[in-house]
Image (spheres, rainbow, N blue to C red):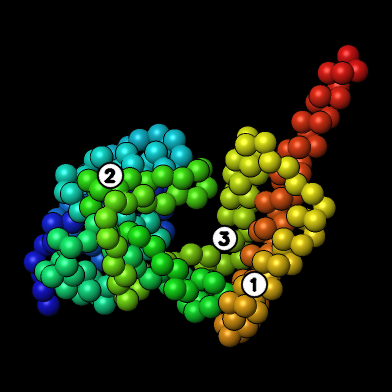
């Protein structure tokens, strides 16, 4: 087994990830450095992270884009691999990283990986979940995180190559997980849309969830993932409904406040 360290800084942002962070860090011993930026976790995330790296930084959360760029700035190596605490670098992916590192890194500014996600104990191969290509390994001198509060991405100057191996994503181990995240992400989505002056309609509430289910279950062949695929696609449709229902709620509340001011 090749134990040579690669001149790559792995950067991770965390908050209350004690159930995931050890599994993630155990597969990163090949990196020159590991940078963990934690948003003042109240569990054992920081304690566990310090078992694997001395570069654990506490920083108040200001949104995903700002937090991830802050983590980039804490790296001392130009090439970085950005991973989440619930992700794992597989031996196959590491092997491909070593291969391109020896041959291609001067030709490219970044590398895409396939992310394979786990839902309620099953690795999902369809539903629009796979291959979930993500730009994760890149030269930080040529790229930064950009985007809004909910959707962040790396804006990179230069050529990008696709790697074929998987980055494993341990997400949604039970239905409670997906319900909790749906509540949180739908609220962020609605607030972001509301701040930009967006509104919702009956058509949004009726047809967007239906189309989401049809796209994920039929067009993206979610049916091939069996009962897991069916439940996942229904949950995806419910998530879309909650996003626009919460936007509707924000608009209604503002109208009510304005009505009360007018009456007074």
The percent coordinates of residue 184 (x first, y second) are 59, 48
* Whole-number angstrom distance, CA of label 2 to CA of label 1: 36 Å
- The mark nearer the N terminus, 2 or 3, is 2
Q: Is residue 241 above or below residue 144?
A: below
Q: Are marks 2 and 3 in contact (CB under 8 Å)?
A: no
Secondary structure beneath dot 1 equals helix
Determine the image quadrant of residue 181: bottom right
Residue receiving disc 2 = 72
Residue receiving disc 3 = 177
Tally of numbered tags: 3
Please state if 152 lies on the left or on the right of 237 as rendered. left
Q: Is residue 133 above or below residue 63?
A: below
- The mark nearer the N terminus, 3 or 1, is 3
Please state if 2 lies on the left or on the right of 172 as rendered. left
Can residue 118 be seen by looking at this rendering?
no
* Whole-number angstrom distance, CA of label 2 to CA of label 3: 28 Å
The percent coordinates of residue 12 (x first, y second) are 32, 51
Q: Residue at x 32, y 59 (%)?
A: 136
Secondary structure beneath dot 3 equals helix
Label disc, if present, on residue 237 of the rendered structure: none
Residue receiving disc 1 = 215
Q: Residue at x 57, y 67 (%)?
A: 174
Quadrant of the rendering where the N terminus is positioned: bottom left
Residue in the foreground of this view, choosing between 244 and 226: 244
User: Which residue ends up furthest to the top in the rendered image?
Assistant: 264
Q: Nearer the viewer, mark 3 or mark 1?
A: 1
Quadrant of the rendering where the C terminus is positioned: top right
């Amino acid at each position: 087994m090749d134990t040579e360290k690669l001149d790559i800084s792995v950067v991770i942002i965390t908050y209350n990830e004690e159930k995931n962070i050890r599994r993630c860090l155990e597969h990163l011993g090949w990196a020159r450095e590991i940078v963990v930026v934690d948003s003042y976790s109240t569990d054992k995330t920081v304690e566990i992270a310090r078992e694997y790296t001395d570069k654990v930084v506490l920083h108040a959360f200001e949104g995903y884009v700002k937090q991830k760029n802050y983590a980039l700035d804490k790296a001392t190596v130009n090439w970085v691999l950005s991973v989440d605490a619930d992700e794992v670098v597989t031996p196959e992916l590491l092997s491909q990283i070593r291969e391109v590192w020896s041959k291609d890194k001067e030709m490219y500014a970044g590398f895409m990986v396939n992310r394979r996600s786990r839902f309620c104990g099953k690795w999902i191969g369809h539903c629009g979940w796979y291959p979930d290509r993500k730009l994760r390994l890149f030269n930080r001198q040529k790229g930064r995180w950009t985007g809004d509060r909910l959707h962040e991405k790396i804006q990179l100057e230069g050529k990008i190559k696709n790697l074929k191996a998987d980055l494993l994503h341990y997400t949604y181990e039970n239905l409670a997980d997906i319900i909790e995240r749906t509540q949180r992400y739908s609220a962020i989505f609605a607030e972001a849309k509301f701040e930009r002056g967006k509104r919702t309609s009956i058509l949004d509430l009726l047809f967007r969830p239906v189309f989401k289910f049809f796209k994920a279950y039929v067009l993206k062949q979610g049916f091939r993932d069996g009962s897991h695929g069916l439940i996942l696609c229904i949950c995806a449709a419910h998530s879309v409904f909650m996003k626009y229902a919460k936007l509707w709620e924000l608009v209604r509340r503002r109208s009510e406040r304005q009505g009360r001011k007018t009456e007074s």
